[in-house]
Image (cartoon, rainbow, N blue to C red):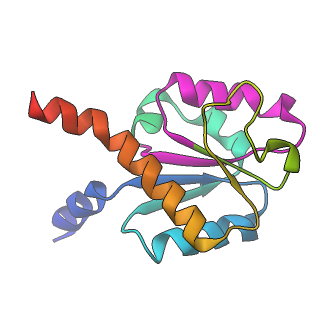
Amino acid sequence: MDEEYRAMDQSFPHIVIAEHEFLIALDAEYLIRSAIDCRTTLVRPEQLGQWNTSALADVDLCLIDVPLDMSGIAPAIQRLVDAGVPLLLTTVSEAHQRGVAGFETLPVATKPFEADTLLAMVRAQLHRAAQPAEDADQN
């Protein structure tokens, strides 16, 4: 029974929420898990540097907090982009609401989260991430 449950659990998308503020991470997790069957992991953004390539390969989406001063987080974001991890940037900064310098193609969700907007963005990123796998299955 445990193996069957683990296999079923692995079929759900794995969403990592990398947030400096624990209560904000809990809010995002609650909103997402109330609407989407998924596995979640809550970490501080700096902890992502400890994740190896195989751990990153298990991530279907990473929400990552972007502070006003990007100097400390930009290398971590670039590492995730290079590893092919789908990202959704999160911020309270008005400066980043229309995009983050150096990562203009990545979507940005503003905090405090509006449930419908956050869920639409998460679903869109999960769908986008699943597209290459679905395309490969059809070949």
Query: Residue 40: x percent and y percent?
Result: 49, 60
> Which range is magenta?
59-87
* Above-or-below relation of 32 to 106: below
Left or right: 70, with 26 as reference point? right
Give the residue drawn at x 36%, y 68%.
37
- Residue at the extreme front of the image, as rendered: 98
Query: Residue 114: x percent and y percent?
Result: 66, 71
Query: Residue 58: x percent and y percent?
Result: 39, 42
Residue 31 is a magenta residue:
no
Give the residue drawn at x 25%, y 36%.
133
Give the residue drawn at x 53%, y 22%.
82
Residue 75 is a magenta residue:
yes
Left or right: 106, with 1 as reference point? right
Give the residue drawn at x 10%, y 34%.
138
| Camera-nearest residue between 125 and 4 | 125
* Above-or-below relation of 12 to 60: below
| Camera-nearest residue between 16 and 112 | 112
